[in-house]
Image (cartoon, rainbow, N blue to C red):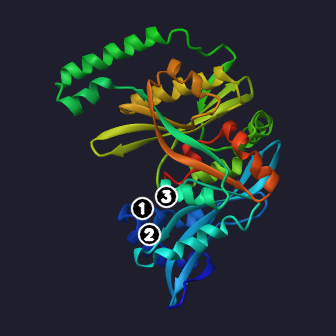
Amino acid sequence: MSRPAMFEFDNTRRDDFVTLMRNVFCAESAARKAVAWDWLFKKPDPTGARTFGRGTQKDGSMVGACLILPHTLWIEGKESQSWWPVAVGVDPRHRGAGLPIVRSFFNQGPYYGGMPANDEIANLYRKLGMTGEVMLRNYFAPLRPGKMLSRRKGLPSPVAGAVDAGYRMASAMAFRNTPSLREDERITNVLHFGTAFNDLWNRARYGYRMTLARDSDYLNWRFHEFPLHSYDTLALWQGETLRGYVVTRLEEKDDRTNGLIVDIFTESGDERSFALLVRAAKGMLERQGAEQAILQLPECAWPVQGLKSLGFVHNKPMTLLQLHAADNQMNAKMPCLHKHWYFTRADSDQDY
């Protein structure tokens, strides 16, 4: 019996890839990739690298595949090329067809990163040389607890409204020591990511040991050109200097509305700017009807220790983030470096 052969493909193989995804994952996931397909292959990268597909085929049919996106990785004070596989899927009738694809991640570099779908795949990545990993967590801040109780426990609507009003008053008292805008500060809506965002990235990146580049080309591609969801972006200014930004969207899930903080970025350790942006995002999401705000960060990210003071009262683990360096010396440093990773929901394929 012949073994599946490795190959690479471009955006002309959309239908084959979507059909495979439908068999491996679900119709909803396949539909998202179909809509986002052209957008994914237009991802900008300063080096000129482009998204491509890698797969295995047997008798001319695609039996395993993934998409590999280029990302500029800021690590240890310099920019490096990195590759991030998404939607790694294998036809259940050809289970061995995925191993050559996964092995290939460790043969080409300089960096590969991603989020394994389960513990079994995470262990396989470790056996193949993956050394850097950190748990990504969702942090939850209630916005409309009365509405949540009405949905979950059948609390009458008038009572739920009173609970929400009381919660807003209690929150205002509990968080009265959080910072408020000064005379020279303002928060604005963002319709386009311009040069000020490049200035912020060029200034802020030196405070991070590991993160993905957030230049204006990437931000415009990720949020303004995205075909599946509409995002709201707020920017914090001090005079004419951009101090940071936050990106949100609403998620209609089953019978509830969640407010997702998809991305938030400031200079590392700038707790004041981070708090101002979180407060503005929560206020906007509450007005839009969200029951809770959800922020995803690595459990070791610098803002995590202050999230309770911002109303994020509980959290739960979501998935591992793993990173591999082709250079053996750098790969050996990963167990230490991963503690300084800054990564948000926007940097993964959870929205697409």
Specify which label sits upstream in the sequence, 1 or 3.
Answer: 1
Amino acid type, mark 1? Ser
Residue in the picture at 65% in, 39% down:
342
Residue in the picture at 72% in, 41% down:
337
- Residue in the foreground of this view, choosing between 14 and 109: 109
Say the numbered circle drawn on residue 29: 1
Tag 2 residue: 21
Residue 144 location (% of width, % of height): 34, 26
Question: Looking at the image, can residue 352 be seen?
Answer: no
Quarter of the view holding residue 341: top right
- For label 2, count other residues whose C-alpha is less than 10 Å away and answer few (under 14), some (14-19) or many (20+): many
- Residue in the foreground of this view, choosing between 154 and 285: 154
Q: Report whether 3 appears left or right of 71.
A: left
Instruction: Between label 1 and label 3, give the one nearer the viewer.
Output: 3
**Numbered disc 1: secondary structure:** helix
Figure check: 72 above or below 144: below
- Residue in the foreground of this view, choosing between 199 and 334: 334
Residue 351 location (% of width, % of height): 49, 51
Quarter of the view holding residue 91: bottom left
- For label 1, count other residues whose C-alpha is less than 10 Å away and answer few (under 14), some (14-19) or many (20+): some
Specify which label sits upstream in the sequence, 2 or 1.
Answer: 2
Residue in the picture at 40% in, 43% down:
251
Instruction: Between label 2 and label 3, give the one nearer the viewer.
Output: 3
Marks 2 & 1, CB-CB < 8 Å contact: yes
Amino acid type, mark 2? Met
Tag 3 residue: 120
Question: Looking at the image, can residue 193 be seen?
Answer: yes
